Amino acid sequence: MEWFTAPEYALSRLVLLRLLAAVYLLGFVAAARQFRALLGARGLLPIPRYLRRNGWREAPSLFQWHYSDRFFAAVAWGGAAVSAGLCAGLGDAVPLWASMLLWALLWVLYLSIVNVGQTWYAFGWESLLLEAGTLAVFLGNAAVAPPWPVLLLVRWLLFRVEFGAGLIKLRGDRCWRDLSCLKYHHETQPMPGPFSWYFHHLPMPLHRVEVAANHVAQLGLPVLLFAPQPVASVAAAAMVVTQLWLVASGNFAWLNWLTVALAFGALRLPGAPSPHGHRAPLWFEVLVLAFTALVLALSWWPARNLLSRGQLMNYSFNRLHLVNTYGAFGSINRVRFEVVVEGTAEAVPRVGTHWSEYGFRGKPGELRRRPRQFAPYHLRLDWLMWFAAISPSYARPWFPGLLDRLLAGDRATLRLLRHNPFPGEPPRHVRAVLYRYRFSTPAERRADGSWWHRERVGTYYAAVGR
């Protein structure tokens, strides 16, 4: 079937799959490094306790058969090893069927983690990685030309990511419609980056240009992905540029880089196609067509969601995360609040007690510490601390446990932090204070070198002792 193959996209597929493997690698490494404190047997939201309440139907996962911290580490580091191999070209060095099995293995391993990850994995880019991972299984390797049906599914996924985000904004906060949202967003986003301070201080007319360009990128360009070439390539390239703009302005884990990877499904790169290996075996064509039919059938729910006034954001319609709906920042915070965790060595806290502040890796804390670039790596605790500052209800299941681990000097928890003010002996008491943070003005920045200024709002969590 001549229409089935698209050899002119061979180089684009290679870039797409290498980027996707790199994102998988980051996801598995982050899981391996952070799970003991967050999800381990003695974690803040232990997987064993979750599995006692949720069976295969609610949480399909390898851990339904067996869970131990050692087994989780084996799954995470094993996934990282396979991801690194695929990123280095392993998928093209093995037969087609073996390449498909390697990509399927990554999907099974990461799905097993996400489905027991609870609040720590309740982010849209987890579902996006899994959905993109299923497409990778059927994209083939160097032995066959890229299958055209799967390239179209990649574009359909990219369309839903961008168009869904655009619609959720237009239907959401008024500031997206009056073009003023980025007056606040660079300052109040979950984890500002090293250039966010400069983005925040752009003149208001440029903020309006930013918002207008975002609407064009998310509502206009996705439609052109299905246009003939070179229109589709121009649209995809423009979307890559907008994603790199977001990379420069903040930390959004691997969302932007995964979106860039998907753009190569429409971005046709120059270069002569391989002179051999274009003909796909019949069994591969049958599997691709069956998979395409499945995705189209499952697309009914996200397509209907796009047209709904009650549009859902970042929602999976099945526990396998096969075809999902996406979107982000339908509403924008005007004020930034931060939860600051403190401890003291005094036996009985009283007025005048000296409290020492714990430092987090990514979220704002120390006023003279410039925001760091962590994306595409995902600091899960720091992200959840942003939600905790918005409303204590987000933190109720795990925040008391966090304070308990600090009182105990738990090593796994302390490894998630940047600074422990009690390196010798754990504190006698800990508490949490709520502050209002804002970026310093240029004048304040010149005067005292501060990136942030803050005002105490009140007590977030009263002092608790051992």
Image: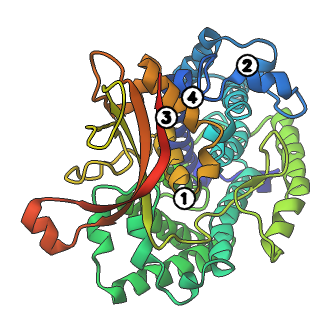
Q: Quick one: 238 or 364, which is closer to the camera?
A: 364
- x then y, percent, for residue 440: 23, 67
Circle 4: element type: helix
Q: Residue at (42%, 17%) from the top-left corner?
A: 411
Q: Is residue 228 visible?
A: no
State the CA–CA distance, disc 3 to disc 2.
Answer: 25 Å
- Is the C-beta separation of discs 4 and 1 under 8 Å? no
State the CA–CA distance, disc 1 to disc 3.
Answer: 28 Å
Which one is earlier in the sequence, the residue at label 4 or at label 1? 4
Q: Residue at (82%, 31%) from the top-left corner?
A: 59
The residue wearing badge 2 is 48
Which one is earlier in the sequence, the residue at label 1 or at label 2? 2
The residue wearing badge 4 is 38
The residue wearing badge 3 is 26
Q: Nearer the viewer, mark 4 or mark 1?
A: 1
Q: Is residue 200 visible?
A: yes
On screen, residue 98 versus residue 400, left or right, reads right
State the CA–CA distance, disc 4 to disc 1.
Answer: 20 Å
Q: Quick one: 50 or 23, which is closer to the camera?
A: 50
The residue wearing badge 1 is 390
User: Amino acid type of disc 4?
Assistant: Leu
Circle 2: element type: helix
User: Amino acid type of disc 2?
Assistant: Pro
On screen, residue 294 versus residue 92, left or right, reads right
